[in-house]
Structure formats: structure tokens, C-alpha cells
Image (cartoon, helix red, strand yellow):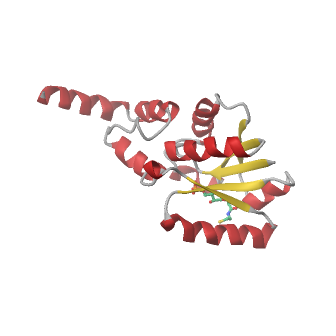
Amino acid sequence: MNAVFPGSFDPITSGHMDVLTRAAKIFDHVTVTVMHNARKQGRHLFTLDERLEILREATAHFGNVSVDTFGGLLVDYMARQPGSVILRGLRAVSDYEYELQIAHLNRQIGDAETVFIMAATRWSFVSSSMIREIASYGGDVSEMVPRASAGALRRKHEDVYAEREAQNAGTH
Ligand code: PNS
């Protein structure tokens, strides 16, 4: 069975990677799909192409994971691949209420089934938005994201990282 792992992936975190690794052992194939909305383009740190590039690099070692993108309703994407299920990760109970609502809506509007996989507790506090926040100040996120994301964040905030490193070197 194929699982579709949809998200913004701005950028992919170690929590996403953990869920993906677990899912790749359960499902025959997992498609990581960056859902995008042309009207919300400016709201992301990384462009769609950058996010796809990071994902391709971060998932290259899996034999049964592919990367895709879709700019519409998730249920319309799911309808193109009958028999597939939606995969979403859960970090904590706080995720559950929101995810439950979306899962029910996707079933209501498109008869799409959602399967949840719990991320390891060590990633329960990691989110793409917090990663973006830390990286925007030049903070070290390398333990919480795959190498592809860490490199892309560093390139995106090159000046901030260089400045913080110079400052810290000066204080030692
Ligand atoms: O990584 P995210 O931002 O939590 O992912 C949310 C995502 C992209 C899976 C969700 O917003 C989505 O499915 N968007 C596509 C549009 C859609 O189908 N919306 C109806 C379900 S709320």
C-alpha cells in the first residue's frame, strides 16, 4: 500500500524524518508531497523548488520514498491514486485535535483515510516554525533537522550565522 505524507515541509525536520522512517517500514511506498497554494507562496521561508530539493536530498537513502508536489485540495490528489492513505505524524496530544478535524474533513469531502504515526518523544518539541525561528537568529538546529535542511537554513541566513559565530568566537 502507498501512503501519501502531505505537508508544507518548510523545511523537513527530524520529527518528519522519524515518522517517514517508521512509515517506510510499514508501507510499500511513501510519497512525500509538498502541498502548495499559489496564493500563499510568500508565507514560506523556502520556495517550493527549494523545499523539493531539500526533501529529495533528505530522502535519497530510502528505496521506497518519492517526492512530489500538488497545488490543490489533498483529497483531489488522493483521488488520483486510489487505495492510498494519508499519513500524518503526531507529536503530542495537542496535535491530535487539529489532525482529527482535518482527517474527518478529508473523509467527509473525499472519502480519504488518514493513518497516524507517532513521532519519537525526543522530537515532540520540534516544529518547522520553531526551527525557522532559531535559524533566523543563527542558532544551531543541526540536531533537529536532517543535514539537507541544516545546510539550506545556513545558506538562507548566511550573514546571521557568520555574525553570531564571530561574536561567540570573540567572547571565548
Ligand atoms: O505541514 P502542515 O503545514 O501541517 O501541512 C498541512 C497540509 C498541507 C497537509 C494541509 O494544509 C493540506 O492538506 N493542505 C492542502 C489543502 C487542503 O486539502 N485543505 C483541506 C484540509 S484542511
Q: Measured along the vertical axis of the image, is residue 145 above or below residue 78?
A: above
The quarter of the image holding the C terminus is: top left
x, y percentage for residue 171? 12, 30
Quarter of the render that holds ligand 1: bottom right
- Rendered image quadrant of residue 96: bottom right
Residue 26 vertical placement versus 96 (above, below): above
Q: Position of residue 55 (x, y in %)?
A: 61, 36
Which quadrant of the figure has residue 37?
A: bottom right
Task: Give the total number of marks visible in the rendering.
Answer: 0
Give the side of residue 6 with respect to residue 77, left or right.
left
The residue that appears at 38% across and 39% down in the rendered structure is 141
Instruction: Locate residue 32 relative to residue 12 in the image: left or right.
Output: right
Relative horizontal placement of residue 164, taking residue 43 as reference (left or right) = left
Q: Position of residue 158 (x, y in %)?
A: 37, 30
95 relative to 138, above or below: below
Residue occupying image coordinates x 52% and y 31%: 148
Q: Nearer the viewer, residue 124 or 44?
A: 124
Q: Position of residue 115 (x, y in %)?
A: 69, 59
Q: Residue at x 76, y 41 (%)?
A: 29
Does 19 sit left or right of 132 as displayed?
Answer: right
Q: Work out which residue is located at the far left of the displayed protein and give it.
A: 171
Give me the residue at 43% from left, 48% from top: 122
Relative depth, front residue between 19 and 59: 19
